[in-house]
Image (spheres, rainbow, N blue to C red):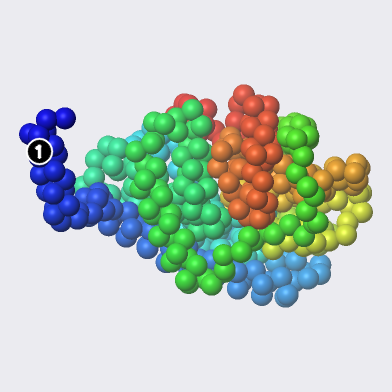
Amino acid sequence: MSDFSRRRKLILLRDQVNRPLKLNPFVFTKSFFVWTLLGILGGIVAGIYWIIIDHLMRFVKNFSAGWEVITIMGGAGLILGLIIYFKGDPGKLDVVLNNIRFKGGELDTKHNGSMIVTSVIGISAGSSAGPESPMVQVIGSLGSWLSKKLKYKREDHRSMTVAGMASGFTAMFGVPLAGSLFALEVIHHKHVVQYYAALIPAFVSSGTTFIIFQLITKMGLAPVWQLPFPKAPHQIFDFFWAMLYGAVGAILGWGIIWTFRILKKFFKKANLPFYIQTCLSGIILGILAWKFPVTRFFSHYELIDLLHGNWALGLLVAIMFVKIFSMALTVTSGWRGGFIIPLLFIGAALGMIIFNVFPNQNLGLAVVCCMAAVNSCVTSTPISTVILVGALTGYDFFIPILFASLTGFFLAPKSPLIAAQLGKEK
């Protein structure tokens, strides 16, 4: 190396050392603060929403532990049916996803009041639908509204809506990474790359929402459904068992999708006034909740009871099928709410049934794999489901869950349950 080259390198090194440190300019962009603001708004809305439904669920559960649950749920069905009948349909997850894919992420906030009120009534009364779908719609529409105020266009507008969706999922699941990926995957697994621009906004908003939600609700950071079963050592055959559990979970997933479609056709053919439909379904849900209390509500607390309970095989089978029917009846008859957490309850019941039939299995592995396979089969979200199940159960060996989730996904029916995933505007 020549003396000139050496001196030149020393001068460049000196300039680099003396140059003032600069933070990544990305941090200081307007968009970053907008995504953070959306996360704060989402965390506040979701936190208040959760506190309301949590207190109401506990009150109603203590107030209606016997046959009176039938009256409570029938009355709740009538009230929310009348609200929707006179105020208009606040929409469903299909509508949200349809608007993301085909309308540039345009969501209207005008139905948020109706969605919040009707979902609170249904969830607190004991329906088998969860709060994730209402929060996805409400916070997603907040993202769309904020985007319009700031005059965002095209992909930036869509990204804001997706970030709001991710915040909604994160608040109700408590897993920012899974909530963000779930928001992209649930739109359509084949188009995740198409929405890649929304990934960073989703992460930022979700992370912010998670912190604000935790500060408001004080729910804690421990896994919600920590598995109470003894941990067995991991073995290479766990991967083969995981695929087998995934196949069984996929079979059940087909049955769940079939149940949804049969009930949807039934209500369409019956052509009842909407409030009568929701009232009658509420009475049926009340009867099922009276006879099988663990199937009532959307399973946030009931899944803990299921995992810690000592259930006979016949009762477990009954609980699983009652939950499938009550979940499908809730959603198809017009009660507002999501079905992700109920699907995880059903998957856990399936894993416990398998263990009851073949007691030499690894119970924890069977439960988490069936949870992942059922959810992945029905919702077509194989990657986010792995993170979600692992984080919520505290099961730290993710690879078998991945095998089960992918098996459930690949064995899922060609026509998905969520109509917006078909690739055609509805």
Can the viewer see residue 136 in this picture? no
Residue count near mark 1 (Cα–Cα under 10 Å), binned few <14, some 14–19, many ≥20:
few
Q: Quadrant of residue 23?
A: bottom left
Q: Secondary structure at mark 1?
A: helix
Picture quadrant of residue 224: bottom right
Residue 312 position in % (x across, y down): 92, 54
Horizontal side of 325 relative to 414 (left or right) equals: right
Along the line of sight, the residue nearer the viewer: 372 or 322 = 372
Looking at this view, is 299 or 277 the one in front? 299
Residue 5 percent location from the top left of the image: 11, 33
Left or right: 292 as drawn, with respect to 38:
right
- Measuring 48% from the left and 72% from the top, which residue is drawn there? 216
Q: List x then y, in percent, for residue 313.
A: 91, 49
The residue under label 1 is 8
Residue appearing at x 13%, y 37% in the figure: 6
List x then y, in percent, for residue 151. 21, 47
Question: For the view shown, which residue lies furthest in the top direction?
Answer: 414
Q: Residue furthest left?
A: 4
Amino acid, disc 1: Arg
The quadrant in which the N terminus is found is top left
Q: In percent of the image, x 68 and y 51: which residue is there?
A: 395
For residue 226, above or below residue 418: below
Q: Is residue 34 visible?
A: yes
Q: How many marks?
A: 1
Residue at 39% x, 35% y: name it: 195
Residue 402 appears left or right of 313: left
